[in-house]
Image (tube, rainbow, N blue to C red):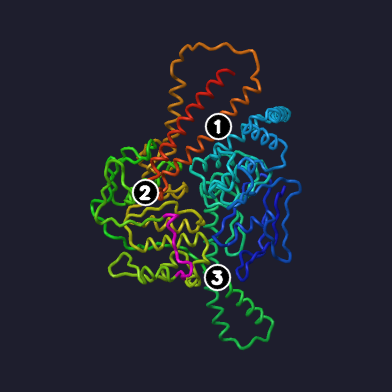
Amino acid sequence: MNYLTVENISKSFGENILFENISFHVERGQKVAFVARNGTGKSTLLKIITGEESAEGEHAKMLLYKGIRLAYLEQAPKFDSRQTVLEAVFDTDNEMLNAIRNYEMCLLRPDDQEALQKALAKMDELEAWDFEVHIKQILSKLNITDLEQSVTVLSGGQQKRVALAKALIDEPDFLILDEPTNHLDLEMIEWLENYLTKSKLTLLMVTHDRYFLERVCDTILELDEGEIYRYRGNYSHFLIKKQERQEHKVREVTRARSLMRGELNWMRKQPKARGTKAKARIDAFYELESRAEQNIKEESVKMDIKTTRMGSKILELHNVSKGYGDLKLIEKFDYKFKKKDRVGIIGKNGTGKSTLLNLMLQFDKPDTGKIVKGETVQFGYYSQDGIQLSEQKKVIEVVRDIAEYIPIEGKGRNITASVLLEHFLFPKEQHYAFVHKLSGGERRRLYLLTILMQNPNFLILDEPTNDLDILTLNVLEEFLMEFKGCLVIVSHDRYFMDKLVEHTFAFEGDGVIRDFPGNYTQYRDKQEAEAAAAREAIENAPKKEVATAPKKDHQISREQRKAVNRVENQIKKLEAKKTELSDKFSDPNLNPDDIPTLARELEGIKQQIEEKEMEWMELVEEM
């Protein structure tokens, strides 16, 4: 059964043709990914399917199977500014979800006992309690805790998580996702990956997360040079079949060029054609010429930009600690960087990753310990917050402002700014485009190029993969694999980390940084093995006789359930406030004068959490 049929769809903006006469279908139960370069209209296509954009084309047809429930996660979700998080998540016509929403709202207004009793009765009538637990699990996994907040105060990343939670909670038949892993930390991504793999949802998604493509998708649609190619299988299968297709194309073009040389000799010798056979041969010649002129693109940045010479002393961290008040971010950390070190940094938001980078770059000083930087170290620092390109400059001018010629490895060898741009996938026709016309991914690529041109020998990349398509990621990875200096990466892109990193700093909370000799996947495998060993040890431990309390012969009352839920909600709000305050300590723009006040406020929140947890335990024991 086809849930979606797309036929002869076209779309353009002025002279810019995004795609033309493309066709495909999505069957019930399939998990389909749509991949293409940045700027080719992936998000626009999703908006056409969901009705937010109109399609073009005389014979364009777009059919959704009648009666299916559709949910759509946009890259930048939009909410009603009057809504709270609770109202946004439960903005639906589903009766059970409305009952759960009313019940949750009553818990936030405990004085209205009549409304609460009605909400409890409706929950019992619809047997909605199990589904309420399921919803709370989704909200918890996506770290959505303060349901009373207005959506207007949320960051873009928080709004994306709220929209994702809503899409999952709605339990649609057909779910369309546009970059679902953006703004999720590594644990959230792994949870979502498992959730979608086990679900029976029909999926159509756009994502650059290659492990996500590998583990969730069973079909990949590729838009390449205006044509749709369908691959039945996951990302590995896609790579194999795409390579076979490209090799076949190379053989075809090479053969056509060889044949064309012979035909060209014949054409030059012939007078103007009068006979039918000669005309047919001339027509065939022009068709052959068209095939022979196809451009076989091999995108690559395999070149060695010359790095500054690095001495024996690089960067040393000796017994380094850093915190704010009672919040410990880094505690007694030691590490000496060696030549060609490739380190990945992972951990939840607010655990101190940015703080460590600031210390390494000497933007901040440690509370205790010392950091020694070698005299020959020259940092190159890529940060999402650091992208400052002049909007009115042309792409070539941005690069030439740094250097007209760039030295590469080999005595006296240089390449021009123009050639360097082409290596980084900026074709010649784009060199004189203004910066303000570049896409988000193209801006990031240009910004990264300006950093690399300064010949650093110690490169620090903070979330470099956001907004980059798969081809650009491959290009960046190829370049970084040839980079001869030290490399430090903070990223939620597991594939990117695994491909480039040989060493991992894992922030495990409370100031602990685990120095692990391996990449991200190896670290996670080690974690899981340790957890399994701990569970086995507990299961095999001698069982002690424990006196058990006699079972109570009465049902848990609604009043007891209400009291427990009320305290649980209070704890959630306090935890959300604790996270918010902890995040502020990682802000590089934090005013030092504000630190004591924030530290006192954080300590007060922690005490309130402890008190509420004690109250919760007492209530549970009484049940």
Which quadrant of the figure contains the C terminus? top right
Foreground residue among 440 and 479: 440
Along the viewing direction, whichever of 164 and 172 lies nearer the viewer:
164
Question: What residue is disc 2 on?
Answer: 357
Q: Which mark is residue 570?
A: 1
Horizontal and vertical percent for residue 552? Answer: 61, 13
Q: Is residue 52 visible?
A: yes
**For discs 1 and 2, the disc positioned in front in the rendered view:** 1
Check disc 2: other Cα within 10 Å, few if <14, some if 14-19, many if 20+: many
Image coordinates for residue 465, horizontal then vertical, percent: 47, 53
Q: Which residue is mark 3?
A: 294
- Does 450 appear above or below 28? below
Q: Earlier in the sequence, mark 3 or mark 1?
A: 3
Question: Which image quadrant is residue 96 in?
Answer: top right
Q: Are marks 1 and 2 in contact (CB under 8 Å)?
A: no
What is the total number of numbered labels drawn onto the structure image?
Answer: 3
Residue drawn at the location 37% of the way across and 42% of the way down? 505
Is residue 236 among the parts visible in the rendering?
no
Quick one: label 2 or label 3, which is nearer the N terminus?
Answer: 3
In reply to whether residue 56 is colored magenta, the answer given is: no
Give the magenta range. Answer: 383-395
